Each structure stands twice: as structure tokens, then as C-alpha cells.
Image: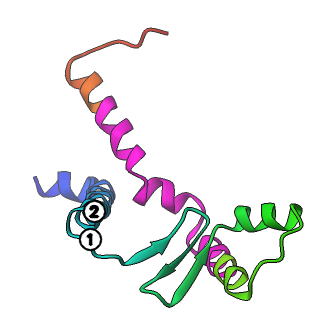
Amino acid sequence: MKTWILTHRFTLARRVVQLSILGLYMAANAYGFMLLSGNLSSSLVMGTIPLADPFAVLQMFAAGVLVGMDVLLGALIILLFYMVVGGRAFCSWVCPMNLVTDAANWTRKFFSLRSCG
């Protein structure tokens, strides 16, 4: 058992992070607390720290929109975060779709199903 945990420690850590974030999303909807407010392209963390999607900001520039300084700062924060942590960190540690595809793969192996292709 101890060797299995050591072998799969990163997978277990990823699952804890993914399930925790999924739980936070559900709790935010169920209980109404707002850690993050805004929309898909720009938001505020706890009402103070701006975050913005860098690609959305580029689209705004291409469309000729004048963006505010807080949106530029938010895009810079996200860009620096991805440069430090890495772009794949979101997909492997946070994205709930990874949890769904891993569960589908486990189900396929558990029931000995072969792929159709």
C-alpha cells in the first residue's frame, strides 16, 4: 500500500486539487459566496485583484477597443502566472474535463471494453 501511494502521489494530489476546486464551484453556487466575480474575459478576485484573459484582450485590441488599465493589469497577471507555472498546469491540475476523461478511461479498463476505432 505504501509503495502504491508513493508511485501515485502526483495523481492523488491532482485528484485532491480537482475535487476541491469542483467542490468550491458547487459551494459557490449553493451558498452564494463570491470569491471571484465578473465574466469569462475579465473578473475580480475578492473585489480587488483584476484578472483578464490575455487572448480576449488581444481580440479587444484587434477590434479597436480602448481597454482600461485594470484589464491590462489583469492580462499581465494571468500571462505572468502562465509563464511561471506553465500553460499546462490548468489543464492537468484544475480542469474538470481531465477528471471526466480519466474516469471514462478507468471505466473502459474496469469493464474490459475495447475501443471502436
Query: Marks 1/2: CA distance?
Result: 5 Å
Q: Residue at x 58, y 77 (%)?
A: 51
**Is 93 left or right of 74, judged from the image as shown?**
left
- Residue 97's place in the image compared with 21, above or below, is above
Any magenta on residue 2? Answer: no
Which segment is the magenta one? Answer: 76-105
Q: State which quadrant residue 86 falls in.
A: bottom right
Q: Residue at x 23, y 65 (%)?
A: 27
Contact between labelled residues 2 and 1, with CB atoms less than 8 Å apart? yes
Answer few, some or many: residues within 10 Å of disc 2's Cα (few below 14, many 20 plus, some between 14 and 19): few
Residue holding disc 1: 32
For badge 1, the amino acid type reads: Gly
Residue holding disc 2: 29
Any magenta on residue 91? Answer: yes
Examine the residues drawn in magenta and state their main secondary structure: helix
Q: Secondary structure at mark 1?
A: loop
